[in-house]
Image (tube, rainbow, N blue to C red):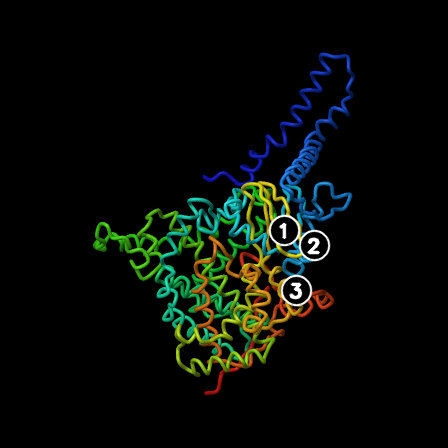
Amino acid sequence: MAIPPGLIFVVSVAPFLLVPPTLTYGVLRILKIHTALYLPTWFTVLAVTLSRPILSQFQLFYKKYADKRAATTLGAHIIPSVARQSTDLFGFNLTKRLVKDTRENYVVEPFRLWAKEYGPVFQIELPTDTRIITTEPDHIKAMLSTQFDSFHKGPVLFKMMQSLLGEGVFNSDGDLWKFHRSMARPYFTRERIADFDNFEQHAIKALSRAEQRLAEGYAIDFQDLVARFTLDSATQFLFGYDVKSLAASIPYPESVSHLNTAEFLNHPSKVFADAFTEGQNRSIQRVRAGDIWPLSEFWKDGIEPSRKIVEAYIDPMIHKALNNKEKKPQTTQAGDDKNSIGDSGDTLLEDLIQQTQDITMLKDELINLLVAGRDTTASTLTFSLYMLAENPSIEARLRREVLDAVGPNRQPTADDFRGMKFMKAFLNEVLRLYPAVPINNLTASQSAVWTSKTPGSKSYFVPAGTRIIYSILLMHRRTDLWGPDALQFDPDRFLDDRVHKYLTPNPYIFLPFSAGPRICLGQQFAYQEMSFFLVRLIQRFENFKLAPEAQPAKSKPPARWAHGEGLQAREKIWPQSSFTLYVKGGLWVTMDPVKQ
């Protein structure tokens, strides 16, 4: 039986909480026994009670002093801190604001407001730790590339994500991370990523589902549709067997939700997808709660039930692949440098078992890759349709390119995509304004100094052990990095002289797939899959429009947003962030079948 997370947390912090009061009481007892000093009971109670808070404040002040000395020695500055109210001694009100803004306001809005006041890098002092937030490309470059060894996921983030991701590639550091990375890399060859038969099979099913529902006179949740498409294609790619989520149909609008059949609501793929999503949402809640997250799951790991449901689907596939491996004759000759890696089977799973037969490691790796293979692509396709619906002239231009390159019916090829410059620019612009992973976290494994070539910037000291949040979304929207029209959706910025003015001199201002040693292995796979689906979508449908009447009332942007700044004032939907960016309540749309 597993020990409850809350109990583990209480035991781990007990010395921190109890040692100062115990020592204080002991010292006061000794003074009372061996001296004539009179100490009233109220004083003893007060001293014992306040010993831990007073010591914490002393440790905080000393750390600030030590950090300042270290920064001065290195010729660096201390990162500015967000001011707290005088009554917010330990940062609880700041924590409440973060939680409230995350639930009620625009995605990463508090970070945007603080960046406006304090600049692109600042820190917030919370009850359990101090966190640095940055949107500076040179700082992010340092973490992901030039100072890669000084930043890692770290033990705190590892424990938060372990229930769902285990020790997979997205939740590991050091040699274990390198091993996971090396296991998956060989499969992402040019031949493997162009898995067009897989894309075609599931794209046709998805678009047929859409056509059927639209013919009934109802809007469709495009976000749900592409999530099913990417889930089925991802599981086909990983396991050689898809979970058939598109076989479960698609949801009706909330106003006619009674039309959703029991078969749809209880379909095994829906149980799998819901558990997978729930596990991710709870993992993100842990990250937002910080070190004290076990208190919200005191007696039971809140993610474990979701992980078990996901494993129930994955286990049979792993065992089948292991059995098939045992039955296959070993044809690899001794001394063969290839060792059949990357060319030993039709699926990624079959390749992975050539390198390890550790079932736990295989499950962790597959779950990690499923997060990347399903959610990031579904997110980008969702916001792609949102931008097409909001920009009819761009839809018309993309349609012309598709018809010129592929025609009205033919299945696209990799050669077609190489000539479709506007398609690539369109996807890049979606990824710029709505990156699939809007924020990310790392931890400083050792002290470091950040510098930046941005005019007027300072060098900053980053203390070892500090957690760092970096927002790709906010960086992608900075007008000083992308020009005065940074908040306008304009794919041409990736085709005209703005590329040479902004992006070429500073490529780290555009990081939808991360960078450095942790750059996404599936980047080209994602571009191929997204381009393929958009081609098939445009060949089959036109006149994309939002359907606000079908949007659940609680998921519509609050009226106050219209008076806000930036994209928030123009949004017709409510972007939110879990592991990836998504539309709250779904993206409900209508579209017309193309007349042949």
Pointer 2 or 1: first along the chain: 2
Determine the secondary structure under disc 3.
helix
x 57%, y 53%: residue: 140
Vertical position of residue 404 compared to residue 347: above or below: below
Pointer 3 or 2: first along the chain: 2
For the residue pair 480 and 13, the one nearer the viewer reads as 480
Pointer 1 or 3: first along the chain: 1
Question: Residue 82, position in %: x, y?
Answer: 71, 49
Question: Residue 77, position in %: x, y?
Answer: 67, 45
For the residue pair 151 and 533, the one nearer the viewer reads as 151
How packed mark 2 is, by other alpha carbons closer than 10 Å (few <14, some 14-19, many 20 or more), is some
- Look at discs 1 and 3 and give the one toward the viewer: 3
Vertical position of residue 2 compared to residue 273: above or below: above
Determine the secondary structure under disc 2.
helix
x 56%, y 38%: residue: 9
Determine the secondary structure under disc 1.
strand
- Look at discs 3 and 2 and give the one toward the viewer: 3
Vertical position of residue 438 compared to residue 220: above or below: above
- Indicate the amino acid at tag 1: Ile
**Quadrant of res 572:** bottom right
Residues at marks 2 and 1, CA–CA distance in whole angstroms:
10 Å
> Mark 1 highlights which residue?
133
> Mark 3 highlights which residue?
479
x 41%, y 52%: residue: 181
- Indicate the amino acid at tag 2: Trp
- Marks 2/1 in contact by CB < 8 Å: the verdict is yes
- Indicate the amino acid at tag 3: Thr
x 38%, y 51%: residue: 362
Question: Residue 199, position in %: x, y?
Answer: 40, 70
